[in-house]
Each structure stands twice: as C-alpha cells, then as structure tokens.
Amino acid sequence: MSDKSVLIGISGGIDSAVAAYLLQRRGYRVEGLYIDNGFPSRGEDAAARVAETLSIPLHRLDISTRFRKEIVQYFFDEYCLARTPNPCVVCNKKIKFACLLDEAENRGLEYIATGHYARIDDPGGGNSLRLRSGKDRTKDQTYFLFMLGQAELARLLLPLGDLSKTDVKKIGAEIRLSETAERESQEICFIPDDDYKRFIEGKHDFPQGDIVTTDGKIVGKHRGIHSLTVGQRRGLNIASERPYYVVEIRKEANQVIVGREEDQYFSGLVARQALWISPDYPESGCLRTRTFIRYRHRGVESDVLIAGDGTVTVSFDTPQKAVAPGQAAVFYEGDILIGGGWIERGLRHD
C-alpha cells in the first residue's frame, strides 16, 4: 500500500467534494469512488464534475443488486413488522464503508474517507479509537455511524469534523466546487420524491385496520400499518377537540393505538443488537450515558443496563416522547459516541 493515499466516497455533493479537496491540501494522493445503487440520480454526473475539477481519478462501483437486497429489502421488511427503519445507518455499515474498504484494499490505498461531520480520537492503546461528534453540532452525523468499529476507524479520515457547514460552503465557493457539486438532498436516496408510502405500496398490499385509543375505543381507520409511525399526529383524520398521537402499532392485530399528549411519554426502552465502538466495553453491566432515540433528538441522560445477548435496557432520567421501534438508540459519553442498538419497544413510566 502507498502511504498518504486515500479513497474517498464522492457522492456529487458539496461535503464530499470539499473533503476530497482538503485531503489534497494535506498532501494525500486522492482517488474517488462513486457508488451506484441502481436508482436514478444526477449524483454520478456531479461526482464526475467534482473529480475533473480536482483532477483526481474517479472509480465507479455498481452495487445495485446488493443495495436492493441489503437496504431496500430491509426498509420494506421493517415497515411490514410495524417498525420505523433507518436505512442510512444500515447503509453506512453494510454498503458505503464496506465498499470503500474493499476498494481501497484492492487498489492499494492506505485510507478511506467520507464527508461526514464527525471526528476520530486516538488516546492510545489497543481498541482506543473513539468517534466524537462533529464541531458543528447542528450537522453532527455520528448518530448514523454507530455501527462502525475499530476496523473502520483505523482506516478512516474525516476532513470535515472540525468545520462548520458554513466553513464548508465557503471553501466550496472559493475553489468553485459549489458550481460543480449537486444540490444537497435530505430525502432517502432511493425514494427521490420522498413518498415512501407509495414506494412501499408498490411492493405489497397492506390491509386497512382500526385506529384504537389506549382505552380500547375505535376512533378511525388506517390505510396500513406502514402509513403511520410512533409519535405521528398529522394524517390520523380523527375528529377531536384535543389531538391524538400514535403511541403504538400492533402488527398482529393490525391496529394503530393512539393517545393524548400525556400518553406519548416513555420512561425508557429496550434495544436489541447493541454494538460498541470499542470491544473494551463490557458485555454486561451498567453504563451512564446520554441516549439519543432519533436523529435531531436532544438526548437524555440515562442508565443503560447491558445484557450478555446484545440486549440493553435503557432508563431515562426524564420521560421521552415517541420511542419508535426500529429506530436507533445511540449512546454517548460527553461528545464521544460509544455505541448503539435498535429500539425494540418503549417502556412506560409509572
């Protein structure tokens, strides 16, 4: 392998473009990788323009079959199980970073890189690499990276971790990358119109069912359990002086359970398939963490009880709304991400 060489994922957006430029400035020999997931996108053309502007080679990898099997099918299956999926978290681990590592190995490149707003610290010693929040907390993306471990962090460079989004836009404008990069999108990449309900309904018929209050009263009909998520208020079409919120989805009964504002709160949660950034964290025991139950959540101080089977039970210091099965519960000590798991169910407060 050649030292000071790096393979960076180029999506066509400004973040990965500026990240590639910064790596060049730091003396790295940079090569780009565009990962084609098989869904229509203008990203490949934009990625090619970025690579041309920076005078770096751009490799293309077609993972369309793998993407449909590992990400799209997961997305669909989770909704069928009355869960709210988070495809970006799964894609980062199973697709993006896996592809970057494989391609870097094949091409003899020392490092991989992305345009994520996150930082890596190395206090020294075995299994010591830590993933820290990006300096710009409004753009911090560590939540989506909780499935990474020491193997990925040891090869990973994150040039944007100490920058704000404003800094990145300014750099992009100065070197005219803003003119070549594709406009950012907040949508799910394989659902460009953001109509996930129509996307799912194109693959499966979901039966209508009852919307039921917490005390058992039928107050409406839903178009399918895929169409609503825990915490949702809009779109219930229930005539009432006080708003209802989705508090539970019962797959077997094909029911959506609704309650009032005060019924939304959970005292904790149970999460499965917990993973830790470092294997030095205990397989059992209790940790004190700040727990984030979705992206953009403000986090809550918590006690996390770790069982030996990958299950964790989280007790919040303050009850939280909208604990949605299928979403990620991610754990921090200060600004250091230590791990996370997939929410199985919320726990009610007394």
Image (cartoon, grey):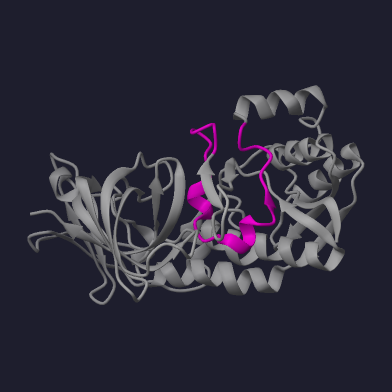
Above or below, comparing residue 65 to residue 185 in the picture: below
Residue 233 relative to residue 180: left or right? left
Residue shown at 79%/62% (left/top)?
104
Q: Position of residue 11 (x, y in %)?
A: 72, 48
Snapshot quadrant of residue 14: top right
Queried whether the magenta region covers residue 141, the answer comes back as: yes
Whether residue 233 is visible here, answered yes or no, is: no
Quadrant housing the N terminus: bottom right
Whether residue 177 is visible here, answered yes or no, is: yes
Q: Position of residue 166 (x, y in %)?
A: 62, 25
Quadrant housing the C terminus: bottom left
Residue shown at 64%/64% (left/top)?
95
Residue 310 relative to residue 150: left or right? left
Above or below, comparing residue 183 to residue 317 in the picture: above
Residue shown at 19%/49% (left/top)?
265
Residue shown at 58%/72% (left/top)?
70
Snapshot quadrant of residue 284: bottom left
Residue 179 relative to residue 115: left or right? right
Above or below, comparing residue 296 to residue 219 in the picture: above
Nearer to the camera, 100 or 336: 336
Secondary structure mostly taken by the magenta-highlighted segment of the chain: loop
Q: Position of residue 152 (x, y in %)?
A: 63, 60
Count of numbered badges drawn on the protein:
0
Residue 268 relative to residue 241: left or right? right
Q: Position of residue 237 (x, y in %)?
A: 26, 49
Queried whether the magenta region covers residue 143, the answer comes back as: yes
Which residue in the rendered view is the most extreme toward the front? 125
Residues shaded magenta? 134-162
